[in-house]
Amino acid sequence: MTNTASLRTKAGRRASLLAGVLVGALLATGADAQAATRPTAESAGLNAPSTYGIDWTDVPTEPTKTVVKVTAENCLCDLTEGTCDANCCCDPDCDSNEKAQFTECATCVYDGANAAMNGKVCLPEGRSPPSLEYCLPSSTVSRVNLLSSSSLGVVEQRKADMSFLSQQLCIKDDNSASLGKYFLDPGFATDDILKSSVTLQSERFWNPVPAAASETQPKYRHNDTIGVVKAASEPLLPGNKFVLPGATFSGVCGWTNVIGYNMPLPASAASEDATCLVPIDDTLSKSCTTLLNAKYLVNDLKLAKTPGSSATPTEAPTISSMKYRSRIGGKLTDLTGTVPAATFTDGSGGSGAADTCNFAVVEAHYVITHDGSGSISSFAVDLVFADVMTSTRWSAVYNANGALADPGNPSSVRVKYTVSWKLSAETVVPRSGAPGYVVGAPLLAGTKDTSSGKNAVARLKDGLTIPGAGPDGRCSGNGKSTVRFGMSQSSSCAIPLSQDNLKTFCQGSGDKAVADYLYDLISVNGVLGGTTPDKTKAPGSSVPLPAQLMDGLLYGTLDSNYDLSAKTVMVAAWANANYENIADWKSCDATDTTDCATELTAAEQLTKPSGDSAMSWDETTKTCKNVAVGVNIDVLTAKVGHLDHAQSKVQRVKVSWNLADWTYTDFPWDNAADDRQDFMLKSTVHFVEMAQDAPEGVKPASPPILPTLPADVFYPFLSAGPAGGRAAASAAWCVALVAAIFVAWVTARGDDSY
Amino acid sequence: MAAPSLALEVFLYFGKLWDVVFWLISFMVFCYKGYNLPYPGNAYEMEFTYLFMYLLVEPPRLFLGSQGNKSVRAGPLWASMVLAGFVLFMHVYYIVAQTFVLRVDYWMNVISLVFLSAQFLLSGTQALDFMRGA
């Protein structure tokens, strides 16, 4: 006690001294206060490196290596030294006051060391250590952590219950060298280990760069670059190779995607590297003649069927489909005729085409057909065109008389290119894994379709989607966000509403479909076409906004305006489910066959919130309460298969509304009819891993014929043979056997010994 | 003229009865341990296998001991004592070296060792007597 009091007194003195110094420093600063001035001269150079300060009094003269214990008892959420990590219940830096401030969680109940943290959030700490009941005398401590024979494993030794049976079944002694399976610290790593590991892992981190085929090579090999054959006066792609625009480090398009033979783009379903951005600033006129131009990407593109400079070219690609994407809302319309080359219309006049790249290629999806033995037969392409306006033009459009929304200032247009390969007779259908899902791949989904009494799944090409934003951040029925497996996500977009719009919408008097409402806000008559905006119009609320934006997907009430409403939605449990075999998409309860975990019938889908959850308008606070602003999708996942190569599958899917209150911030200078504020729609997807029991069906190795002796049985005589206890023990047995035979031979008597 | 030993026969008879109890309880204890304790590698399988090898060795050992004693022949007694070597090894292993020694294991094997020791010593004495008598 005396020592503690003395320490506290010293600490108190130090604190007072420190406070005095600080106050003095502040006063001194105040006395000489001057505004900061700019450095007299700027210069090039590197900033000084930023490091943590070293307190040299704490640095040992002869450092000793810290034994790292990677054990189950570690506190995985303790990520900051010297301070309490929020919601980390095992952090020794957190005192009771700090733990009392942890996030409330009414449903959180813990046992063991965290029993006192019930009602609070505790971040994952790692698995609890193994616990065994030992026969300990009453005089000893009842719980103790003992190091096992290895420096890594720790087991909790617990005193057994005093009942007769427990006392007989408690562990009196143990000879277990390990009490669990651990990766041991492998120690020093040699250069050879690095080389062999790199070899084993090669081409796993990123796609291999395609290599040029040799001039004499008769056929392509996988990942050979593909030549582009030049005809008279035709332009070529960079390097005379088949190259498509791809994202550079800034996301802006460059000629980076060199296509390799039989290598798809993107390389896997999980990657999104097939898109890039084209700035719509002053450089758009140049991009219009290169990156965005069908002349390079389609019309003059002829691939070499085989390697070599004298190879026969394919014909120009067959056009599988051509669509035009509208500037506002992104609606696709089929086009017919020949492929138009992009042209740039200069000027900033009032017409719709000024400062615009007309018929820019914003999507090109190539399907290349090969013969299976290294030759390209032909190729086809699906195209999406759009008229891309410069940012100057966007401002002009928004500022035109009658515009009802601010510009949103888009600065670029996103373009997308994909390449897939097939044999002549194949139909290419991408999977999201085989058989388990790959993290990041689209979650396979579709709607149940029936024909002639047979059922199949109309699989959605983009997988399951949630409402997303268009290029200007506003909600768009064609700007959905794909749900990707294993990646919990949230997707937001804005809907601009005036106070009158919000009130009308909330009271259910709006009569515009939200897509039409958003289109009419921007598409000023005479500039981009469409109708003259009517500021009194508001979005309708008979169908919640997220359901409108998703075309009725996951909405259980039939509405003829939305194609997917009331349709049974199927989510594939396994990533390689065949959409023509609906049985692969179901996993029904054995007793209640109506409960198919990944099949959402109309009755299990969302309906318009009613009762206490119904939308209502509060005039006092200008608040629309209980707006369905999005969908929440909970996806339960599980792992199946060998521990080293477990496959992920979907176990169950559940949807619910995300309800929120929308309050119009009533500034005095705002006009209730004209001034719009952005209200956010927000949808979320949670991927939750199922709590699973220990793996079953483990077939143990066959028991050895001879029991294993300790590796050090002949200590201090050491084996120079291969390292490992089992080898040493086997050697020990051999020696023991020879010794026993020798002794038996020496001591053998005659045959009349009985 | 050497005579059969009553003491040896008594130990062999009650040892046989105890062996039944020992084997059944050990079997159940191994089931319990297999479910509840974290065995490394294939140690559990090996230790459980010993119990079944015991089932092969112990009845012939007792039979040979009893037969040698009653027929006043040293040969079966020596054979019984050779087989006792494995049984001795097994009990000592179960007491000292098995992965998890429960208290019930400990006492069961100690009792078995007492029987085994008595049977071994008496068999040895009888065998020597029979050899001298022959």
Image (tube, coloured by chain):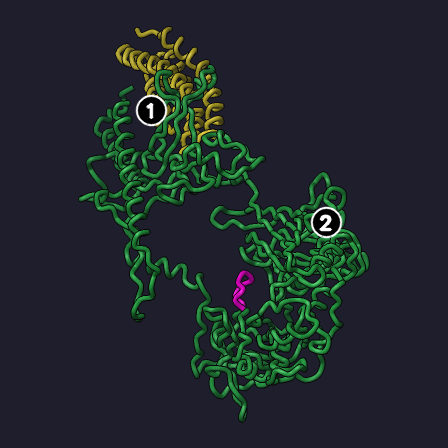
Label 1 and label 2: CA atoms lie apart by 83 Å
Classify A668 as above or below A396.
above
The circle drawn on residue B96 is: 1
Q: Quadrant of the C terminus of chain A?
A: top left
| In the rendered image, the vertical position of residue A470 relative to residue A108, given as above or below | below
Report the number of discs.
Answer: 2
Residue depicted at x 75% and y 49%: A607
* Chain letter matching colour green: A
- Type of amino acid under label 1: Val
Circle 2: element type = loop
Chain under callout 2: A
Magenta stretch, residue numbers: A265-274
Overall secondary structure of the magenta section: loop
Residue A272 magenta: yes
Rendered position, A673 above or below A376: above
Question: Are the residues under marks 1 and 2 on the same chain?
Answer: no
Give the residue type that dot 2 points to. Answer: Glu
Residue A136 location in percent, x, y?
37, 20
